Image: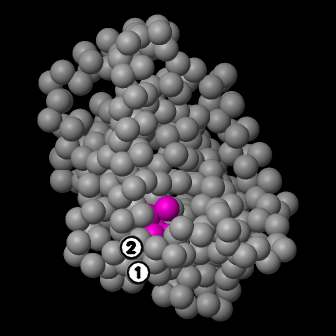
Amino acid sequence: MDYRRANRAFLYMILASVALTFVVVLWFMTGGKNIPILLNNVLSELMILIPGLAAVFYSGDSFKHIVPFHRIKISSAFYTVIYVILLFPLVAFVNAVSMLFVDNAVSEISGDILNMPIWTMILSIGIFGPLVEEIAFRGIILQSYHKTGKILGAVILSSILFGAMHMNFNQFAYATVMGVMLALLVEATGSVLTSFLAHAVFNSIEILMMFSEKDVFEEASELFSEAEESAINAPFLGILFLAAIIATTIALCLVYKISENEGRSAFFANIVKSEKKGYQLVTVPLVLALTISFGYMIMSVYI
């Protein structure tokens, strides 16, 4: 499967997601009842999974060839868990900065999440969501981009698409950063299994933290919202930035250690110098998809 088909698949993902949103809005306007967050999450992930799998099917390539779920060493899995924990300060910092300009998308649905049994949210947001998104973005899209020889470009662009798929500026910011770190993990191991493990651990920890603080979550959210405008001058943001720099530096060292552990250190160290094959990653369907995504995000802010 080549990069052009991957870009078309992403366009279909965006169109399907926008279509789902309009269907839900129409449902409400015609007197429909509130859609449970679990069902909404599943439908949203299917809007990503179905176009991706269809692209694989019509490409004629095998799923295993396009999405490498190779086994990794137990030690690499252990390092991966440490790696993703080290990413929390970076994600928290990017999230805090983005909230100076836009609302926190997760906090807006936190009430719906907390009204559900914790195990259903772990399965939905902690397991099913990461599985679908890793298959689509670190699997189908990233691996298809690899064929251009532009490994670093593939890492960055697939991460931007991962952020854009969330359809709001707040999640776009930290999802893009997270996407880069997850893609580096795949490059270090040659397996989407590691990025799925990292993504699942990250989301599950967030869900557990949310439920553990259930009694004070709403109050804390209100206090944080009041502090958003002054957060850029607050000492805690500077401390968070410093923590992000230190933790991310350690994480990058650790991901190189993982590449050594999996026998891919030579490849990983030469990502920037990878041999280019003259192809352009950006195509018309991709530009159209990003235009729709960012247009939708802008409309969400001002409407």
Number of labels in the image equals: 2
Q: Identify the residue position indicated by label 1 in the image.
A: 263
Q: Is residue 258 above or below residue 97?
A: below
Q: Quadrant of residue 146?
A: bottom right
* Kind of residue sitting beneath label 2: Glu
Q: Position of residue 245 (x, y in %)?
A: 43, 36
User: Are the two marked residues, 2 and 1, in contact with CB atoms closer than 8 angstroms?
Assistant: yes
Q: Identify the residue position indicated by label 2 in the image.
A: 260
Q: Residue at x 37, y 51 (%)?
A: 251
| Quadrant in which the N terminus appears | bottom right
| In this rendering, position of residue 236 left or right of residue 4 | left
Give the residues drawn in magenta, as a range: 184-188
Instruction: Please say whether residue 20 is visible from this viewpoint.
Output: no
Residue 165 or residue 251, whichever sits in front: 251
Q: Residue at x 26, y 55 (%)?
A: 82
Q: Position of residue 293 (x, y in %)?
A: 68, 45
Question: For residue 185: magenta?
Answer: yes
Question: Element under label 1?
Answer: loop
Q: Residue at x 32, y 55 (%)?
A: 83
Instruction: Please say whether residue 189 is visible from this viewpoint.
Output: yes
Question: Element under label 2?
Answer: helix
> Mark 1 Cα within 10 Å, few/some/many (few <14, many 20+)?
some
Q: Quadrant of residue 267?
A: bottom right
Q: Position of residue 137 (x, y in %)?
A: 55, 64
Q: Is residue 13 above or below residue 22?
A: below
* Kind of residue sitting beneath label 1: Gly
Residue 188 or residue 115, whichever sits in front: 188
Marks 2 and 1, how far apart in space?
5 Å
Residue 190, numbered circle: none
The kind of secondary structure the magenta stretch mainly shows is helix
